[in-house]
Amino acid sequence: MNIPRVSYPRIVIIGGGFAGISLARRLSKKEAQVVLLDKHNYHTFQPLLYQVSTGGLEPDSIAYPLRKILKNFPNIFFRMANVKEIDAENKIVKSDIGDLKFDYLVIATGSETNYFGNQSIEKHSMAMKSIPQSLNLRSLILENFEDALLTSDLDERNALMNFVIVGAGPTGVELAGALAEIKKGILPKDYPDLDTRLAQINLVQSGDRVLKEMSEKASKKAEDFLEELGVNIWKDLRVTGYDGKTVTTNTDVTFETATVVWAAGVKGATIKGLDAQDYITRGNRVVVNEFNQVKGFDSIFAVGDIACMQTEDFPQGYPMMAQPAIQQGKQLGDNLVRLIDCKPMKPFKYNDKGSMATVGRNKAVVDLESFKFQGVFAWFVWMFVHLFFLIGFRNRAIVFINWVYNYIRFDREARLIIRPYKKHHIVKSEVKKS
């Protein structure tokens, strides 16, 4: 990898997400050589991926070059690499661009979509965990309406305009709200010769309420907002299969649809070498202690979504969200410096700053420790928090300008099919052009 060997200890970080970036920044200008590895050369602000999928933002406004983040830190090296395996015994990271020895290793690979072993859903549904996946979804949504204009088969037309979102967590709720607003304010203008009133947005939740990780008040209000927007909410309904045309459930309810978005769960993105059952717990996450050390190792750590730090308050580990990842990254940076200086490390303590979700224009829910609120004020708070955590002034400015423009014009300028996406497994009826 052409990384110079120096007298300082080498800390290798795998993953340039919230946790990896927070850790790298904390270690900048310290007496350590830091090597950041990621399969992409950019950091993705995942909370806004749904806005890329629905044409509200272009992808470059929620992505930021990793090299630009690290450019002022001479002790940090970045290499774009896909890590294949970890040789823990010999302290070697194996990747597609070569091997690299480490003194300390930090796994910050984040999470990936969890299909719970259902191969038909994995094959035919759409995920939304990365920018390429979001662009695929955006193209598919727009292509569906273009195809709906061309077909004379009413059943096929309805299936093309029928969207099923599985999972009513923040991702599913926010995506459903955005699609409902597109149906209401944009589709009638873009497709005047198509009865877009027939478009259906179905949000399917296996539990008894949406946003189950938030308060009951927030859940109820979010549900009210969604119903006001025309979203069909299906609770206590579990999706069991999807063949590209028909969604089956654990009841006699089925959906004929060309688009299923799977937002029903995530799991840790493990790496070969540390994926044995000795290290893995529920959710495919790596078990760590209160110092983020991987079980059984003194020099290997894990932070963020991939790490499961079990506590009395969080027996299944901290939530797989940005705040725990950022806080763990910062804390581990300080602890690694203490470890190098032969000082005792400090245990991690999570500061829960609350949770929030937006459901659409002027509609959001916010849960803080001692204050819960919904509606317009919550929506402004949601926007401010997301702008604050975006990396780079340009990205903040572009997102803010887009939001203001979209709000005033009730428009989404980025509804572009830049990279066409075709689901070849869907068998369509013969198209008749007029």
Image (cartoon, grey):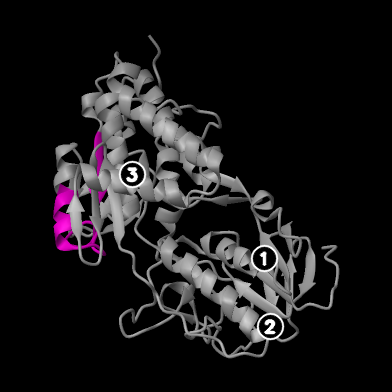
Q: Foreground residue, 91 or 137?
A: 91
Which one is in front, 310 or 388? 388
Quarter of image, res 362: top left
| Residue at the spot 19% in from the left edge and 37% down from the top edge | 229
Q: Residues within 10 Å of mark 2 (few under 14, many from 20)?
A: some
Q: How many marks?
A: 3
Can you identify the residue that label 3 sits on? 175
**Does residue 341 show up?**
yes
Mark 3: secondary structure = helix
Alpha carbons under labels 2 and 3: distance apart: 40 Å
Q: Which residue is mark 2?
A: 88
Q: Amino acid at mark 1?
A: Ser
Q: Position of residue 353 (x, y in %)?
A: 33, 65
Specify the amino acid type for callout 3. Leu
Magenta-tinted stretch: 200-223
The mark nearer the N terminus, 1 or 2, is 1
